[in-house]
Image: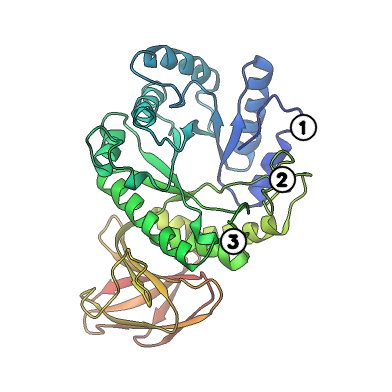
Amino acid sequence: MYFDMSDKSYTEAEVERWAKCGCTVMLAGGIGSTEEHWSKAERFLDKAQEYGMKLIFDCGAGSYYGCNESNVAQREEAFRKVYERFKGHPALYGFHAGDEPSTTDGLEGTVLALGLQRRVAPELDPYINLAGSTWKMDGKFNGLTFTQWMKRLKDEANCRVVCFDNYAQTINDGGRTDYFRIIKNMVEAAEAAGLECWETPLCSAHIAYKSMDEYGIMWQITTSAALGIKGITWFRFYDRQIAPNYHASPIDEYGNTTLTYERMMRCHRRFNDQFGELLMRLKRKESWMLGFQRMSYPMFGENSHPLIKDIKSFERMVISTFEDENGTEYLCLVNAELEQHTTVQVTYDREKCRLTELILNGTIEGRYRSGGNISLYPGQMAIYRIDRR
């Protein structure tokens, strides 16, 4: 969020627009440095509480920028002063810890910054956004692998959530291959480290990155969720006059909502209504591709699952299995095309299980008969519970 509480045109009225758009956690900008600014930030929190939202603030002191062993104690005390002012507010999610650390010092500072935030505010989650290329930054983790460095975030910093950028899907089909490869490497490292993984996809066009239509926005949400992403923070919600190459954001540089805003609003609400609560209770087990391998996930075949014998689709698919706390398994299907509708047929072992479609977060159930047609528009998701006999 490129606003600060010192900006007099930036008011808590924005919270209503975020809520209307279906956002549940929002980066709300810098809190400033005076009591006047902090009181304004508190009004943002109060408004967010009215809508059942949570906010992330940038306070500077809790970031990785310049953080090292020689100053981490002083930075912790500076962060504590901010925390004491806002602690206990039910709408506070956490504080920003920085964006895209890409050097050895920056990555080391990230561990320190997240650690100081968690020591001072153990009930909050600091927000760190990694570059999508972090998984291949060999040689920058002080002799560790990327997964080992992520484990440091868990063990040394007591971190619970990590986020990363992912934009190339808006360029071309080759960019979509990179998109899936990034998700696979980032999510699998986070899962191995015991971290929840969030993602920052794109809703603002710039340079070679084009704007996405409604199918494209939903596609980014559903493919990410199917592959283990637990939260999305979009880049970027507002256009600004100082950056004229950026365009087609949900809110333009004049403060007007755009077609992107309306598209995102429907996509957020549809996804939250259908799958948001359900997927937060599930843990990803395995993921596959169908139709095109994307140099990342394996292809689904006849030996991929003991009960699901075959999945046929006219177009490309993302397929995953999930599991709940009771060990019940779920099958997730996503049409991985941005333009083409697809028809899917799932064949399962009818002597050992049956599939139950879950609609509206499982409040409505429907029987799926083996081999029947499933119709999915571009980016559409469907989830089935695997009921073992």
Q: Earlier along the polypeptide chain: callout 1 or callout 2? A: 1
Q: Nearer the viewer, mark 1 or mark 2?
A: 2
Image coordinates of residue 155 in percent, x first then y, are 26, 33
Q: Earlier along the polypeptide chain: callout 1 or callout 3? A: 1
Looking at the picture, does residue 233 appear above or below residue 58?
below
Q: Residue 27 falls in which quadrant of the image?
A: top right
Q: Nearer the viewer, mark 1 or mark 3?
A: 1
Distance CA(mark 1)–CA(mark 3):
28 Å
* Quadrant including the C terminus: bottom left
Q: Residues within 10 Å of mark 1 (few under 14, many from 20)?
A: few
Distance CA(mark 3)–CA(mark 2):
26 Å
Q: Earlier along the polypeptide chain: callout 3 or callout 2? A: 2
Q: Are marks 3 and 2 in contact (CB under 8 Å)?
A: no
Looking at the picture, does residue 172 appear above or below residue 16?
below
Q: Which residue is mark 1?
A: 9
Looking at the picture, does residue 91 appear above or below residue 69?
below
Residue 166 marker = none
Task: Identify the amino acid type marked 3.
Answer: Cys
Q: Which residue is mark 2?
A: 244
Q: Tell me what residue is drawn at x 54 percent, y 24 percent.
A: 59
Q: Residues within 10 Å of mark 3 (few under 14, many from 20)?
A: many
Q: Which residue is mark 3?
A: 267
Compared across the picture, whether 27 is left or right of 158 comes to: right
Secondary structure under tag 3 reads: helix
* Quadrant including the N terminus: top right
